[in-house]
Image (tube, grey):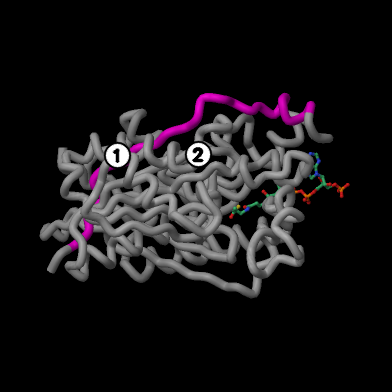
């Protein structure tokens, strides 16, 4: 049987930084409030002519270089995003594939908001284990600034732009295989996080009315409570189903939404500080890119080593959630 191994990680952040002080000049907020309520100090913002596919392509190039896998052998590209280059089509995954020069591939996007990376990890794993694909490039890429209302202090302080990518490939060695991926969803909470305009469910009659209103809307406080509950429950389940103690986890990498959520979940799971990866302070919430960007940080700091067990935990609009137990299994 084929197993799926997590081979490499890469990430990219755009150059421009938007600080809390910058935001305090735009809306009624302060560095003190944002830091205390979210832990975020700054986030990166893509240039006007820099698209989600550019961020994803830059992250993917790094992941491919680090994988030791020939790009010609990549047979599938999946992109998780809620801020695609184009509304509907073509998919951002096909644009990234073109920019990377990949030809013999299947390529598509998925929409699972901040859980996107865990969702595409589960899809890559399933395709590889079924024998249908061998080398899958997965990308979480977001230009959230393109769907953020910079007059709404409830959301604009949180979100940032960036991308992370990983190479998942087939192996016969069970020791290096992804152990398990959980995914879930509950549409009864759909209204907590939405971009309510711009689609067929919109209340607007014409596209011209939509243009300035395709922004994210969030019931932050309610989302916060469901997030802590769901993230904690899902991790407890995946650990117990796989008979793994939390002590065996080298790196707990939760979705980087808000430091208070990360702290509450880490405490509920009795994780030690050195197990918990926190990057929200410098990148903000980059939705589907947040987990691979955080993983890339520990890789570049030399903390992520071959054989380390990572525990991923995500939560986002939909509502959606997911978790994964992933040993780091580089080829080179
Ligand atoms: N600056 C100053 N004051 C503010 C700001 C701001 N930026 N935003 C809200 N406030 C005010 C509110 O108006 C309110 O004032 P009031 O008490 O006078 O009415 C007060 O601060 C408290 O507001 P809350 O919304 O209760 O603040 P909370 O502590 O919940 O923090 C936040 C808000 C940061 C948005 C938090 O709720 C949060 O992080 N929620 C979760 C977000 C999340 O995880 N999203 C999921 C993933 S995102 C995705 O899937 C795309």
Q: Position of residue 237 (x, y in %)?
A: 43, 68
Inspect the magenta stretch and tell me whether residue 98 lies in it. Answer: no
* Mark 2 element type: loop
Q: Which mark is residue 63?
A: 1
Q: Which of labels 1 and 2 is toward the front?
A: 2
- Quick check: 302 above or below 268? above
Identify the residue shown where x is 60% and y is 73%.
187
In depth, the one of 232 and 44 nearer the eye is 44
Q: Residues within 10 Å of mark 1 (few under 14, many from 20)?
A: many
Find disc 2 in the rendering and name its residue. 51
**Residue at image location 29% in from the left, 39% down from the top:** 63
Q: Quadrant of the N terminus?
A: bottom left
Q: Residue 16's quadrant in the figure?
A: top right
Residue 259 visible: no
Q: Which mark is residue 314?
A: none
Residue 24 on the magenta segment: yes
Foreground residue among 50 and 238: 50
Residue 284 in the image: x percent, y percent? 58, 38
Q: Earlier in the sequence, mark 1 or mark 2?
A: 2
Horizontal and vertical percent for residue 10?
Answer: 34, 37
* Region rendered in magenta: 3-25
Q: Residue at x 16, y 60 (%)?
A: 174
Q: Secondary structure at mark 1?
A: helix
Asked whether mark 2 and ligand 1 are closer than 8 Å, the reply comes as: no
Residue 306: tell me if it is visible. yes
Q: Quadrant of residue 59?
A: top left
Residue 71 vs residue 36, the one in the foreground: 71
């Amino acid at each position: 049987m084929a197993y799926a191994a997590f081979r490499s990680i890469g990430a990219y952040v755009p150059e421009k930084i938007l600080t809390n002080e910058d935001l305090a000049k735009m809306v009624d907020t302060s560095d003190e409030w944002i830091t205390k309520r979210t832990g975020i100090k700054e986030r990166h913002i893509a240039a006007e002519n820099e698209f989600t596919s550019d961020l994803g392509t830059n992250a993917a190039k790094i992941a491919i270089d680090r994988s030791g896998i020939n790009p010609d052998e990549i047979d599938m590209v999946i992109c998780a995003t809620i801020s695609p280059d184009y509304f509907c089509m073509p998919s951002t995954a096909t644009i990234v594939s073109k920019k990377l020069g990949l030809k013999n591939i299947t390529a598509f996007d998925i929409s699972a908001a901040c859980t996107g990376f865990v969702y595409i990890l589960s899809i890559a794993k399933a395709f590889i284990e079924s024998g249908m694909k061998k080398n899958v490039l997965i990308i979480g890429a977001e230009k959230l600034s393109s769907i953020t209302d910079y007059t709404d202090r409830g959301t604009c302080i949180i979100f940032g732009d960036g991308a992370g990518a990983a190479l998942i490939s087939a192996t016969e060695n069970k020791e290096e295989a992804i152990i398990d991926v959980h995914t879930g969803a509950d549409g009864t909470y759909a209204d907590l996080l939405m971009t309510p305009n711009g689609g067929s469910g919109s209340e607007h009659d014409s596209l011209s009315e939509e243009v300035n209103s395709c922004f994210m809307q969030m019931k932050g406080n309610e989302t916060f409570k469901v997030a802590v509950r769901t993230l904690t429950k899902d991790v407890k389940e995946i650990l117990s189903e796989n008979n793994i103690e939390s002590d065996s986890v080298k790196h707990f990498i939760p979705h980087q939404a808000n430091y208070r959520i990360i702290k509450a979940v880490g405490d509920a799971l009795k994780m030690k500080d050195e197990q918990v990866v926190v990057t929200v302070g410098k990148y903000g919430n980059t939705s589907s890119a947040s987990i691979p960007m955080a993983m890339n940080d520990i890789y570049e700091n030399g903390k992520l080593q071959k054989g380390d067990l990572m525990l991923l935990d995500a939560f986002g609009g939909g509502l959606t959630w997911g978790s994964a137990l992933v040993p780091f299994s580089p080829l080179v």
